[in-house]
Image (cartoon, grey):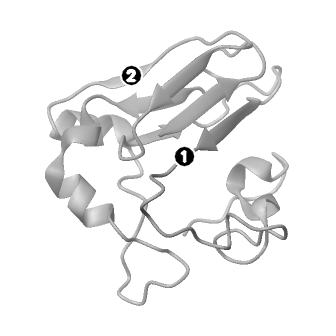
Amino acid sequence: MTCWLCLGNLEYEQGALYVVEESHRWEQHINDIRGLDLARDTTGRQATLSDDITQYAKAHNTRLLTAKFNAGDILLFDMNLIHGAFDHQAPDKPVRLSCDVRWQPISEPFDPRYMALDLGGTFGGGYGELNAAKPLTEDWHKR
């Protein structure tokens, strides 16, 4: 389960969170991502579904859901729900500030890259390597 927490008022153009409606029930999607580890995968599998999430949702005959959020709003969702954030398109407004907390079933083994005193993150660079942690003036890398 994921708990997404909005830390400031958020308009759509500030990089709002989106979810693909009902995608947590798509067995094919769940089977495709189950066990995916970008850092250890040697088959070339990708975590990115599409560069155009709107077209992706239309192609799957579903809706792309988003909202304006206020500071303190939370969204709880299943770990298999397809979700992401739109690009920040408002240079005159602050970037989106949010936090997410994730839980996994105790029956699943934990990954020391994410549950240890010295967290390395997916590729070993810590959480500062994530696109959302980069200054807006830096190019974002694609995996």
Q: Nearer the viewer, residue 1 or 52?
A: 1
Q: Is residue 43 left or right of residue 142?
A: left
Image coords of residue 83 (percent x, y): 44, 39
Crowding around mark 2 (Cα neighbors within 10 Å: few <14, some 14 to 19, many 20+) is few
Image coords of residue 41 (percent x, y): 44, 84
Q: Amino acid at mark 1?
A: Trp
Mark closer to the observer (2, 1): 1
Q: Nearer the viewer, residue 116 or 80?
A: 116
- Who's the residue at 21% across and 33% down the image? 58
Residue 41 is tagged as: none
Residue 55 vertical position relative to residue 34 in the rendered view, above or below: above
Disc tally is: 2
Whether residue 14 can be seen here = no
- Who's the residue at 78% across and 30% down the image? 95
Image coords of residue 136 (percent x, y): 81, 45
- Who's the residue at 49% across and 51% down the image? 104
Marks 2 and 1 close (CB-CB < 8 Å): no
Image coords of residue 91 (percent x, y): 79, 28
- Who's the residue at 76% across and 68% down the image? 116
Residue 103 is tagged as: 1
Q: Can you name the residue that lies furthest to the bottom here?
A: 42
Q: Which image quarter is the C terminus in?
A: bottom right
Element marked by disc 1: loop
Q: Can you name the residue that lies furthest to the front here?
A: 107
Q: Nearer the viewer, residue 108 or 76?
A: 108
Instruction: Say which residue label 2 marks.
Output: 65
Residue 135 vertical position relative to residue 32 in the rendered view, above or below: above
Element marked by disc 2: strand
Q: How far is the residue under mark 2 from the one under mark 1? A: 23 Å
